Image (tube, coloured by chain):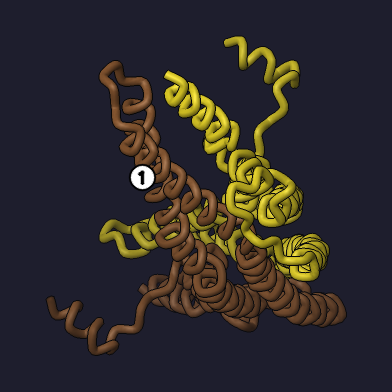
Chain colours: A yellow, B brown
Amino acid sequence: MLSKVSRIRGSIRPVGYPHTEGILGDCMLIHGAELGVESSFGSALVDTGQALKQMAEVRDCMDVRVKRSFIDPLQMLQEKELKEIAFHLKKLEGRRLDFDYKKSSKRRIAEAELKQALDKFEESRELAKRSMFNLLENDVDQVQQLLGLIEASIDYHQQSRDILENLRSSLQNKITDTSNRPKREYKSKSNASTMCCTDTYGFSTSSSYDTEVTQELSEKRQL
Amino acid sequence: MLSKVSRIRGSIRPVGYPHTEGILGDCMLIHGAELGVESSFGSALVDTGQALKQMAEVRDCMDVRVKRSFIDPLQMLQEKELKEIAFHLKKLEGRRLDFDYKKSSKRRIAEAELKQALDKFEESRELAKRSMFNLLENDVDQVQQLLGLIEASIDYHQQSRDILENLRSSLQNKITDTSNRPKREYKSKSNASTMCCTDTYGFSTSSSYDTEVTQELSEKRQL
């Protein structure tokens, strides 16, 4: 009830369709942040996550545009023109049956009555034919709507490509930077490396531990 | 069993993932063919259907490429490096507990034994730290794999865009042709329009019917 009210008020902004790009983007943002920006993979994940989120927005725009320019008109066609044609065809069939019955019936039927039935049938057929003819004559409108769909998806692919091109160059820069950076050698018991492990994995192999250990040991010796 | 054999023989070609483009493409091809190529909407649907089928193939190529260049290496990382690190951390924890127990235990423990426990713990911690350090030092490989993913999807979007651009120009030509073509007026009882209706909707309002009707009528008159 409350959610309904707030939806009417527009205070809850409608949640878009969960696009694959968006889901993967969220996942990369979360785990990229966990790895931390000091790790080049971590920052690469964050960049990629942001790009994917942008792509999800672009896709949402396409969805809205396709609905407006392609799906809605198609629905209109079905609910209006096609329904009208179906109605005319149904009526036509009824009048045909009526005429067939009258002309083939054993009992003598007044010619006037037969003529009237034929006229009604003719009239209905004219209407049905005209409605179908008009639909087929104006089918360029449907092609126009199809073009709307195509143009929406062209823009979607173009924009996605642009976003990814930017991401590619930033990732390539990251790779060259990391490759040019002097290779760190693993220093046994080096705090740096320990800290770095701790930061990234949150695992407590902090080197404060061994100082404490040696302390304890010396105490034991003093006993 | 048979399907398994033929799969081994490779005589059944593996069915790709049913991409949206492919499904929509099939649908448009079927109904475009139903409408017939003489209807400009029908031929537009067929063209669009073919383009969408091409896009589905492009997407399949991307899927294969992403699996090879991104997902497989990621799986390798999880099954090899990360598993190794987890093993070292587990061992380290065990040795730490052993050392803690020995140094805090009430009963007098030979200093040599305590020293040995400490050494084992130190050794394990070195191994764990080294394995994590190596993983973090070589994280540029993971960035490289991420770049593989990005490049695959750039190519996908680029190729889809190209396919759609071609489709757009062909649809625009169709629209201009149809608009330039002289508007046909609806001729009452014209065979042309009736035929056209019949072809398109397969509905039997063929004008052969009224000739038959008038015949019948004249016969009745003769009675």
- Position of A99 relative to B177 (above/below): above
* Callout 1: chain: B
Nearer the observer, B95 or A31 = B95
Residue at image point 61% right, 16% down: A3
Going 46% across and 28% down the picture, which residue do you hit?
A: A217
Q: Which image quadrant is residue B56 in?
A: bottom right
**Residue B131 location (% of width, % of height):** 51, 56
Q: Is residue A214 left or right of residue B79?
A: right
Q: Which residue in the structure is indicated by mark 1?
A: B91
Picture coordinates of residue A8 (x, y %)? 70, 18
A137 left or right of B189 in image = right
The answer to whether any part of residue A145 appears in the image is: no
Where does the N terminus of chain A fall, quadrant-wise? top right
**Identity of the residue furthest to the top in this view:** A2
Q: For the residue carrying disc 1, how many other residues have a C-alpha within 10 Å: few (<14), some (14-19), or many (20+)?
A: some
Q: Residue furthest front?
A: A222
Q: Residue at x 29, y 84 (%)?
A: B12
Provide the secondary structure element on which disc 1 rests: helix
Residue A62 falls left or right of residue A87: right
A179 vs A117, left or right, is: right
How many numbered discs? 1
Q: Is residue A47 above or below residue B200?
A: above
Q: Give the amino acid at mark 1.
A: Lys
Residue B19 appears in the picture as rendered? yes
Residue B150 location in percent, x, y? 68, 66
Image quarter for residue B49?
bottom right
Quadrant location of the C terminus of chain A in the rendered image? top left
Residue at the farthest left position: B1
Task: Give the percent coordinates (x, y) of residue B220.
Answer: 39, 71
Residues B94 and B87: in front is B94
Q: Residue at x 75, y 61 (%)?
A: A160
Of B88 and A127, the residue lying toward us: B88
